[in-house]
Amino acid sequence: QGYAAGAFDGILGIGMEGRTNEGATAVLHSLGVQQFSIWLSSRSGEDGMLVLGGTDPQYHTGPFVNMPVADERHWAVTMDDVAVGGRSIGACEFGAPCRGILDTGTSLITGPSAALTRLTAGVSVAPDCSNFGELPNVSFVMAGHAFTLQPEHYVLDVSNQVLSDSPMLKALFSQLPSARCMLAMQPLDLPGEHGASWILGDPFLRAYYSHYDRASRRVGLAKARANAGAG
């Protein structure tokens, strides 16, 4: 039923471990693919791109920042901090290890509830988008590099951007209050060793073209080219 409601045919697992949740070998691992990269469009209805074997310069601007993978099972890297408007929120004070998990299968950005409470204290999105021009940048600091999101990356225009691809979801939203904009982040307290981790989902990965190298156990991030899929 989920496939019927969305404009997709299935799920392609690309996890670090190379296995599905059921224990089967994942497709890319079966094909012997050691490197791949992903570009996600910021425009609703426009296809993204999975590049097998490496990267494609048409999907990014500037150099890649390469970081070692810090987890055997996930595309996770060590996180140093999160900053709002250039000011630290002390995001890694709530346990260790503090990591950022890159995950195309997560629609939002999630973080430990205590840390996200600090973040939202400085980022309040008006439901009607009226304060969009006043919102600060949010930066995720990894490997000593600040990966910065502007409001256009972390604010979802629900009525126009997110639901337009699914008539069923848009019909459902029309019955809800007239909120138009929402913060593309939510609290999520992961169990065990991941308790201090953030999941950097689609909003983050629309802003940064990501390169995954299983053989070298590293991931690379470069600023995504916004209009790479045009035409």
Image (cartoon, grey):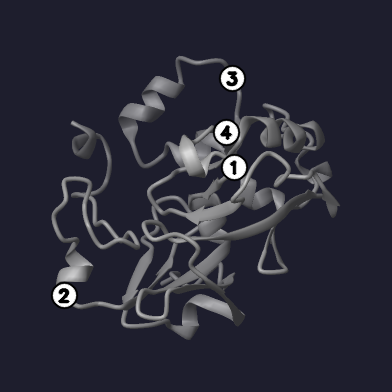
Give residue 109's position: percent from left, percent from top: 55, 44
Find disc 4 in the rendering and name its residue: 186
Which mark's residue is nearer the viewer, 4 or 1? 1
Amino acid type at circle 1 is: Ala
Q: Residue at x 74, y 38 (%)?
A: 119
In the rendered image, which residue does mark 2 sit on?
Answer: 31
Relative image position of residue 150 (x, y in whole percent): 71, 54
Q: Dot 4, how many residues are within 10 Å of its Cα: few (below 14), some (14-19), or many (20+)?
A: some
Q: Which residue is mark 1?
A: 196
Label 4 is placed on what type of residue?
A: Gln
Task: Give how far apart the Cα atoms at labels 2 and 3 are.
Answer: 47 Å
Split into 4 quadrants, where in the image is the N terminus?
top left
> How far is the residue under mark 3 from the one under mark 1?
34 Å
Q: State the residue position of label 3.
A: 178
Of labels 1 and 2, the one closer to you: 1
Rendering coords of residue 93 (x, y %): 73, 43
Which residue is rendered at x = 43% and y = 83% of the image?
56
**Is the C-beta separation of discs 3 and 1 under 8 Å?**
no
Disc 1 or 2, which lies upstream in sequence? 2
Label 3 secondary element? loop
